[in-house]
Structure formats: structure tokens, C-alpha cells
Amino acid sequence: MVIRATEMVISTIDMVIRATEMVISTIDMVLLMFGSKSDRSLNIERQIFAMNAKQYRRSHFRNTYGTKNGGMAEAILYYGCEMKPAIRSLEENSIIFEDGTKEVVDEIVCCTGFENRFSFLDCIDNNPVLQQVGHDARISHNLYKHAIHPLTRDSLVFIGFVRPCFGAIPPLAEMQARWFALLCSGKIDLPDTSTMDKYIRTYVRYIENFLTPYRVNRITNLTDFLSFSDDMAWAIGCRPNLDFKMLLRDPYLWLRCMVGPICNAQYRLCGPHAQPAQARRILLTLKWKPLWYNICEFIMLYTSALVWYCGLKSWLPHTWAPIHERHI
């Protein structure tokens, strides 16, 4: 298996528990190191930890995207799969890799992904505006909220061209669809073109700072699940106000929203088409990480907020303000 850049490998169990806040805790590491060596699944978890540890100098779980199952680690351990660097050159029956090694191969399977193209827009009345929009939309982070081009505004919308580094596309596409439905019904309005352009520039700087320019410009629909969800929730008007009043009124729900598993049910607690009773029931039944983990995360969150309050604006927790209001 040839990869151009290393990625984090996340176990399926952790993905279910917390799709976008992947942390391998110190206790998890200790358990991996001293667990039973005869256990196949534990050996796979050890392999995942070793693979992630090798690339921590270049990236970590907050600035890259993940391989969301242990199949690759299992293939390396038990089925003879080897990780190789990028291909330097091809010969008649062999490959030369960047590290100078050579392998005789029968077939090459290219997993290069897909490219966004909207060539059908070129065929509509030979319209130069649509042609420009179709060209620009290939890089979806250059659209307003990954969906709207300033030239066509809400008359043409691209929904679903948003890929979180950890998490799933459908919940983010749902937030885009809710926002677009409110635009169609006239309940909210788009900002003017200059404001949209300014937001797009700010957003691109934000995700480049968060996920690195290399990843953002190679996978042009890449984003952060929680930051994007909350930013859309600000626009929709459905982001719960996690203030002191909510803490006093419903402390358990407040804690779940602050440091619990990320779930879009929190965006049905208030705002358009809210279903607070059902949303609360879902949030309170989600599986948590151990209590000590949530306590540590809570302490880190408010330590960051304290540093921000003392004057270091870049320490503002990611979802405590819309993206265009953050210090980048």
C-alpha cells in the first residue's frame, strides 16, 4: 500500500463514541502496552497506536483526517501488507519508491479520490456567469458555507460538498439543507456580496490554520466537523445557549452539550423546527467516555477560555464564536 502522506488511524469503537474529538489517553496507551499479547484485537490496537506515534511530529488528531477502521493495521499484522512512501518512478514490471526500495508488481490500484467538476453548467445557454460559478465551485471551501457562490447567491446551491476530517458528511449536509430551507422561505437572508467574500477569505485562513494548507488545498471540501456544525447553527439560529442559566436549569444536559459526545441533536434543542424533548432524550442517552476523561476535557476547555480572557485571542475555544468573529 502506497501513501503520499501519513494519516491517523482511528478505531471504529472510538469513532462511534466521539466522531470528531479523537484522543488516545495515557491510560489507553498503558493498557495497550501491557494487555494480553494473545488477543488479536488488542494487537491491532497496539499497531494503530504505533502507526500514529510515528507521525506525531508532522500531524495529530486535530489537524489531519483519519482512516476510520483498523483494517489497515490488521492487514499489516496478519496479511503481509506493507506501508510504502510515494512512487518515484515506474519500470516495466516494477516500482521505485521515494526511499529507494524496489518492488516487482503485477497491478497498481490508484486510490486518488475524485475531482469536483460541474461541466453541465457550461452547457446552459453558454452563460459566462454559470461557467464561472461551475469553475469556482470545484474548490468548495471558496463557496460561502461550502454552498453558495456570491455571483449566483441562493439561486444555485451546492449542498453536501463538505467533508469533515473526523465525522460524517450527512450531518453537515443536513445543517446546510436546514439553512437553505430558511433562505428559501425568507426567514433568514444572505449577507451582501462583499460580506460573503470577506467571510470566505476568513474561513479559508481559519481551516488552513487548523488543518494545514497542504491538506485543505489537496482535499478542497475538507473542514472540521464541530466548527462547521456550530458555524451553521449560528447562521440558522439553532445553536443552544450554553450559558449560566442553562447550567442552573438543566446542569446534566448542559454538561452533555459542553463535553459529551458530539451529536446534531443538540441543534434541535432550540431554534427553527426545534424538538427539545426528543433532542434532550437523545443527548442524555448517548454513550460517554469515562468520567475522568470528561472532567479532563472540561478543565482543558475552560483553561483555554481563561487564557483567551486574559488577552490571548487565538485561545478562544473553537465553537464559542462564529468563524468570522474569531481571531485568526
Image (cartoon, grey):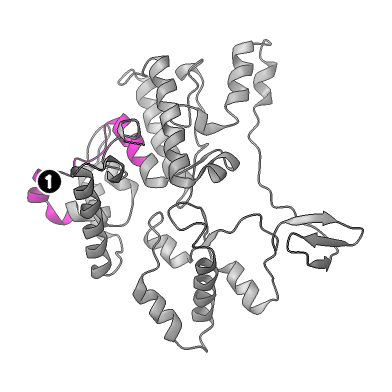
- Please give the name of the residue rendered at 70% of the width and 64% of the height, measured from the top-left corner: 84
- Please give the name of the residue rendered at 19% of the width and 49% of the height, measured from the top-left corner: 306
Query: In this picture, is 207 found above or below 168?
Result: above
How many numbered badges does the structure rendering display?
1
Between 23 and 306, the one lying in front of the other is 306
Q: Residues within 10 Å of mark 1 (few under 14, many from 20)?
A: some
Query: In this picture, is 279 found above or below 106?
Result: above
- Please give the name of the residue rendered at 48% of the width and 65% of the height, measured from the top-left corner: 12
Amino acid type at mark 1? Met
Query: In this picture, is 188 found above or below 126?
Result: below
Q: Quadrant of residue 28?
A: bottom left
- Please give the name of the residue rendered at 44% of the width and 27% of the height, measured from the top-left corner: 200
Q: Residue furthest front?
A: 311
SS for callout 1: helix
Between 158 and 225, the one lying in front of the other is 225
Q: Quadrant of residue 192?
A: top left
Q: Residue furthest right?
A: 92
* Magenta stretch prevailing secondary structure: helix
User: Percent from the top left, x then y, of residue 8?
Assistant: 52, 61
Left or right: where does residue 176 sit relative to residue 304? Answer: right
The region drawn magenta spans: 229-253
User: Percent from the top left, x then y, of residue 36?
Assistant: 46, 88
Task: Please say whether residue 296 is one of the residues in the magenta stretch.
Answer: no
User: Percent from the top left, x then y, of residue 90?
Assistant: 85, 55
Q: Quick one: quadrant of the N terminus?
A: bottom right
Left or right: where does residue 25 sit relative to residue 47? Answer: left
Q: Quick one: quadrant of the C terminus?
A: top left
Look at mark 1 in the image and give the residue it sits on.
246
